[in-house]
Image (cartoon, coloured by chain):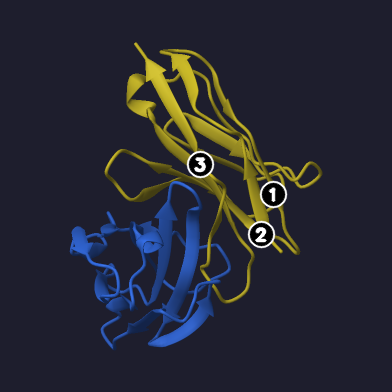
Amino acid sequence: KAGVTQTPRYLIKTRGQQVTLSCSPISGHRSVSWYQQTPGQGLQFLFEYFSETQRNKGNFPGRFSGRQFSNSRSEMNVSTLELGDSALYLCASSLGHGGGDTEAFFGQGTRLTVV
Amino acid sequence: GNSVTQMEGPVTLSEEAFLTINCTYTATGYPSLFWYVQYPGEGLQLLLKATKADDKGSNKGFEATYRKETTSFHLEKGSVQVSDSAVYFCALTGGGATNKLIFGTGTLLAVQP
């Protein structure tokens, strides 16, 4: 079956702009989580959506937002980009039961560079 | 809060050497524990997991045992290959209705022929 698809793979944006990243989870998966990966901070949890509702949120400023559609596809948006937002953004999909008993499948990520 | 502490890298080994990457955790309740692997230019792949104390996860020759008494989940492999070169992440979920993963800092493994 198809894996997790993230688009685009690469993005270059200018400070102050906004950006939208997209994630299509594995068919049948209802949970989508987003992570930011940087050399300095490692992998940090942004938020999790389940059945179109944000179920959990990490410690990021309000410039980072997301949503999930009825087909489970998810988008995340970053407004007023800063240089420090340059990172690999990873999306993970799961069946959604939670509790750690289900596997999270990751996409290849979107590499965002802010100049 | 919950956290994962992972052995600093990089770890450089010769092919067929024994591998250990240390991982300890702090968590309330009964977390599930995971090892993920990231190859260059790729996302993360689940390598193995354990959901309760004394469980042993294993996959592709890698093993890790959930030790509640030492709050550890060390990754081991008896004989590494060049193809095992990657970054390895230890992670946990804290339970409840969430799939949120808390990751360690990652350990870069380089295996030389």
What is the letter of the yellow chain?
B
Please identify which colour was used for chain A in the image: blue
Check disc 1: other Cα within 10 Å, few if <14, some if 14-19, many if 20+: many
Work out whether residue A23 or residue A87 is closer to the camera in this orientation and state it: A87
Residue at disc 3, secondary structure: loop
The label shown at residue A43 is none
The label shown at residue B31 is 2
Residue at disc 2, secondary structure: loop
Check disc 3: other Cα within 10 Å, few if <14, some if 14-19, many if 20+: many
Q: Is residue A87 above or below residue B106?
A: below
Mark 3, residue position: B106
**Which residue occupies the extreme right position in the image?**
B69
Q: Quadrant of the C terminus of chain A?
A: bottom left
Q: Position of residue B22 (x, y in %)?
A: 63, 34
* C-alpha span from label 2 to label 1: 9 Å
Mark 1, residue position: B25
- Label 3 amino acid? Gly
